[in-house]
Amino acid sequence: MVLNEVFKDYLEEAIGKDNSLVAFSAFERPASSSVRVNPFKSGPVPEGREVPWNRHGRILAQRPVFTLDPSFHGGAYYVQDSSSMFVGHVFRQLVKSAVADLGNERPVRVLDLCAAPGGKTTDLAASLREMFGDRFVLVSNEVMKQRAAVLADNAALWGDPNVVVTSDDPRAFAQLESFFDVIVADVPCSGEGMFRKDEEAQRQWSVENVSLCEARQKRIVADVWHALKTGGLFIYSTCTFNRYENDGNLSWMIDELGAAPVLKDDIISASKGVLKTEYGYSLVPGFVEGEGQYCSAVRKVVECAGSCSMQSARHGKPVARLQPDLLRDMFTVEMAFRQKGDLITAVPVNILPDVEILERHLHVLSAGCATGTFKGKDFVPDADLALCIAFRKDFYEVAEVSSDLALAYLHKDPICLPDHPKGFVLISYKGVPLGFVKNLGNRCNSLHPQHRRIRMDVGTISR
């Protein structure tokens, strides 16, 4: 390890001397591997022990080659550190009280502010759907454009049409005064909790970097604070240990922003190994099997001054010339169809007003489900349609394929489906939809996106 003495002092200050000795011993051991299952998709997933704070989480005995598992590419599960899943646990424990006054007047509104690459977004989406059905809208934001593209792709693989992906600086959300019921902010940090996975994070650690992160985190929270309704819930997390970026910032939120702490000891009654801090909880290697994570939560108790305009603005024309039954019958929920350029997208009707408000104020990368395009008389399904959990899987001819053939499809190798009729065919692996081909009889035209193709050698595959 390349950790310096100053970091040791910071860790002792945060979790105590005896606890820090346990942590330093654990830093020398390999990182664990875990996944979280998508409860709204079926199919084979890696087996493992259940994560104590997430019934869909699995701690694996060893890390498989996920790239060679077709279920991974179909969004049947997400690879996520088990400690990172604790943020979702806090969310599930507290969110119902944060939205108790809503009734059925509108969907629950949640913002995942610093969301890339998508681990917490997919966890929040599954949790919201389990608790509220389809009466929620989850805004998943990432300011960095390249990371935002990865986030949008992972959200599409997960397949929940109630997720809206945006790419904006936190200050842009101040326009949406009191819009959100819950904000989750896994803020950029000094990364002490990643030391087992990233040796470079150890080398880059410094007191100056901690101070820089602490100031940046305060700026992010302050910029987005006005977007949270009074009485709303703000969940704050980092993947670091020191008190300056964690409890120190919570103390600042309480003193300066009008926040009240809400976490109680009973939230971790079944979470052995999680360490209680002054305002939150710290997950530390040696005490838990995952990596480092801090999480806390506060409630906004002071009214904001002023308000923002919440007028809707339609981005994309309503689809008028299409056979309406063709599109409606593709989905299990009522959708509104819109067209931008050639692409037709489907947005759940019950969140459309919120989506239109978001489009007025933010840079929306995706909302709902990309459905397809018309080319001549043909409707060409989009790859994301196959992945959407609201898509009727029997709408198209289905080809259940072997692992070899699934990997060939995902590698964008030529495949042939002689036993299936000509036309568009849904490729499925053990019940997990992967995408579409157009079957021409003697060959298939793949509709799998080039940017999602497997690039590693998948070995000798039988055709």
Image (cartoon, helix red, strand yellow):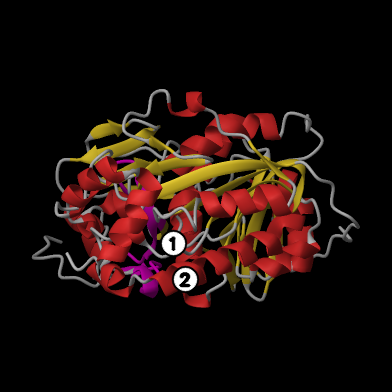
Q: Secondary structure at mark 2?
A: helix
Q: Is residue 211 above or below residue 323?
A: below
**Residue 435 is covered by the magenta coloring:** yes
Find residue 372 and report its horizontal and vertical position in percent.
Answer: 56, 64
Q: Is residue 63 above or below residue 273?
A: below
For the residue pair 153 and 207, the one nearer the viewer reads as 207
**Residue 72 is covered by the magenta coloring:** no
Please provide the residue range marked out in magenta.
425-452
Mark 2 is on which residue type? Arg
For the residue pair 238 and 444, the one nearer the viewer reads as 238
Cα separation between marks 1 and 2: 7 Å
Q: Residue furthest left?
A: 460
Q: Is residue 164 above or below residue 53?
A: below
Q: Which mark is residue 117?
A: 1
129 vs 401, left or right, is: right
Crowdedness near tag 2: few (<14), some (14–19) or many (≥20) residues, C-alpha within 10 Å = some
Q: Quadrant for the N terminus, please.
A: bottom left
The part of the image, by quadrant, that contains residue 306 is: bottom right
Confirm whether residue 327 shows in the render.
Answer: no
Q: Secondary structure at mark 1?
A: loop
Q: Which mark is residue 147?
A: 2
Mark 1 is on which residue type? Pro
